[in-house]
Amino acid sequence: MNKVAIVTGTSTGIGLSTAIHLAKAGYQVVATMRDISKAQLLKDKAAEAGVIVEVAQLDVQSDASVKECVDATLANYGRIDVLVNNAGAGFLASTEQMSMEALQKTIDVNFFGVWRCTQAVLPIMRKAKSGHIITLSSIGGLIGQPFNDAYCAAKFAVEGMMESLAPVAKQFGVHVSLVEPGPVNTEFVATVRKGNAATALPADDYAPLMRNYMKGSEQVFATMGQTGDDIAAVIVTAATDAQPHLRYLTSDAMRGLAGRKYVDTTGDSIVAMMGARLAQ
């Protein structure tokens, strides 16, 4: 039987591309999403690629939903070889101006959602003495980004969780990997920007900083942005590596940026670099 992979957040973007790429690589893919009424694009893309994926409902914010999907997958296929924690949500705001409701949702989706799904598959993989948990992090999980306070906090938490879990899971034959993209031009980014526009900051001290940051970000995405397919290809590489790494940065530019943090243990150069993005 083909290896079985559960992928979360597959209605658009990186998750959709990952489901297709894993299916093309020979995996039986259970492509999950919170709202399966949004599955048509995935089905169309799968048909174009000549592959079959199973669409399943999974809300990473619900313990019951996660358990139901994992239990059903195990019952249907008898195994779960790969979990790709991809579902996520972004939010742009300063710490001062972000509501607790928005903060809690951002942390719940990006961190607790990863925790729920990982916790659900671990007993299965541990008993099988085999498996691979691959989690979509971000360069924002290594280096804080202005106005991404909540998102980066969640991704930093994911990084700490997975780095701590990796050596323990390996004792049971289970691999743990983090995939860390930089700018990716997907619907995810467009949604974050649209949400920010809908809740625009008032004309106060933060407004010019936000405008400068957004202007600079547009240039960064235009010149350095990758595609969902680019990131999916890295995920497949991680899934198929005989000896998977803990971290997979997805471009030379991001490897250079991450390396800068590791070299400068004071963190001063990162603060200066990000601060420059806020000034004209």
Image (cartoon, rainbow, N blue to C red):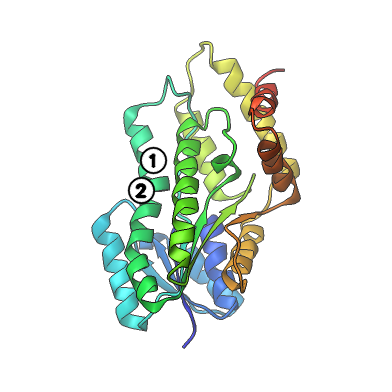
Q: Is residue 7 visible?
A: no
Image x and y of residue 177, in percent: 54, 59
Percent from the top left, x then y, of residue 21?
Answer: 59, 70
User: Which residue carries the number 2 mark?
Assistant: 112
Can see residue 4? Answer: yes
Q: Residue furthest bottom?
A: 1
Residue at image point 28% right, 54% down: 62
On screen, residue 190 above or below 29:
above
Please give the name of the residue rendered at 54% of the width and 76% of the height, measured from the top-left corner: 23
Tag count in the figure? 2
Crowd band around label 1 with a 10 angstrom C-alpha radius: few (<14), some (14–19), many (20+): many
Q: Identify the residue at the far left of this view.
A: 64
Location of residue 212 with respect to 242 vertically, above or below? above
Residue 55: horizontal and vertical position, in percent? 40, 70
Task: Name the spot of residue 116 as percent of width and height, x first.
Answer: 33, 56
Q: Secondary structure at mark 1?
A: helix
Question: In the drawing, does residue 192 fall left or right of residue 237?
Answer: left
Specify the amino acid type for callout 2. Answer: Phe
Mark 1 sits on what residue? 107
